[in-house]
Image (cartoon, helix red, strand yellow):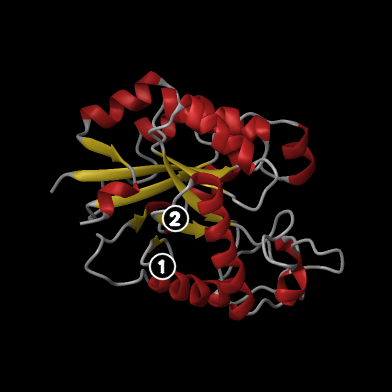
Amino acid sequence: MSKKLIVSADDFGFSEGYNYGAVKAYREGIVTVLSLMSNMEAASHGIRLAKQEVPEANLVLHTNFVHGRPVSQPEAIPSLVDEEGRFYRSFMWKREEGSDEKCVGEVVVTAEDCYKETVAQINRFKELTGHVPNHFEGHSVINKSIREAFHQAATEFQVHCMTEPEVETERWHPVHEIMLKNPLAMDIINRGCTPEDFLEDRFGILNSPFEYNIIHLHPGYVDGYILDHSSLTTARCRDLQAACDPAVKQWFADHDVELVDFTSVYK
């Protein structure tokens, strides 16, 4: 069984500076997917840049409930937004057992609101790109309400979604989240990956028993918006440098790992 790997540039559309780096990582490096935050102000810039520089790129949806303003009217999704109509940041969310440790607040979101905003972001994606994404996933926080909402949306739109468990269908192959199963993954994400993380297979790509696998990177340039709105800063630059390192791309070729996008998971 040949091993296939999707390499996602998450947070596409987060800022203009980040967009330039993500496109570079696709054009010159190992990135195979640009995962768009369709609610963000820089999303339209990212789409224009991708159409100009890498029109063949597989654009997917990076559903976001914790940064910026929603696509929905704020009053339609009250559990997700503050009094100014902005998303509650992830640290304000109440942690579920086993969920992201950054959640230290008291905000409890509902599956109904998460579903409404997921559908709104899918529709905004379609407005920006001209088509529904062939995949969507979540940004920063995943909990029971989000998983329920994602399953409902994935079933309704018949679009592949990364959540556990995956929506079962004969339309696509299952995709394995390598980084969720690897205890070193969060350390790599937080510090930014290096070429050695690939060359020494610290992600565990070669040991995966699955045919289709995915890793998530954040390759991009840091600008003022990133510095003011994200705790992930220099790690993005490191991801970009590693993703574009020729030795990394050669490593995949040497180990017969095929770099693919989400079009390949559909049967």
- Are there few (<14), some (14-19), or many (20+) residues within 10 Å of tag 1? few
Asked if residue 3 can be seen in this view, the reply is: yes
What's the residue type where badge 1 is placed? Answer: Phe
- Are there few (<14), some (14-19), or many (20+) residues within 10 Å of tag 2? some
Reading the image, the residue beneath label 2 is 132
Asked if residue 242 can be seen in this view, the reply is: no
Viewer-side residue, 236 vs 122? 122
In the displayed structure image, the side of residue 128 where residue 113 appears, left or right: right
Q: Dots 1 and 2: beta carbons under 8 Å?
A: yes
**Which residue is the extreme one toward the top?**
246
Location of the C terminus by quadrant is bottom left
Question: Of helix, strand and loop, which one carries label 2?
Answer: loop
Residue at 52 percent across and 43 percent down: it is 188
| Residue 83, image x, y percentages | 86, 69
Label disc, if present, on residue 157 of the rendered structure: 1
Query: Which image quarter: residue 90?
Result: bottom right
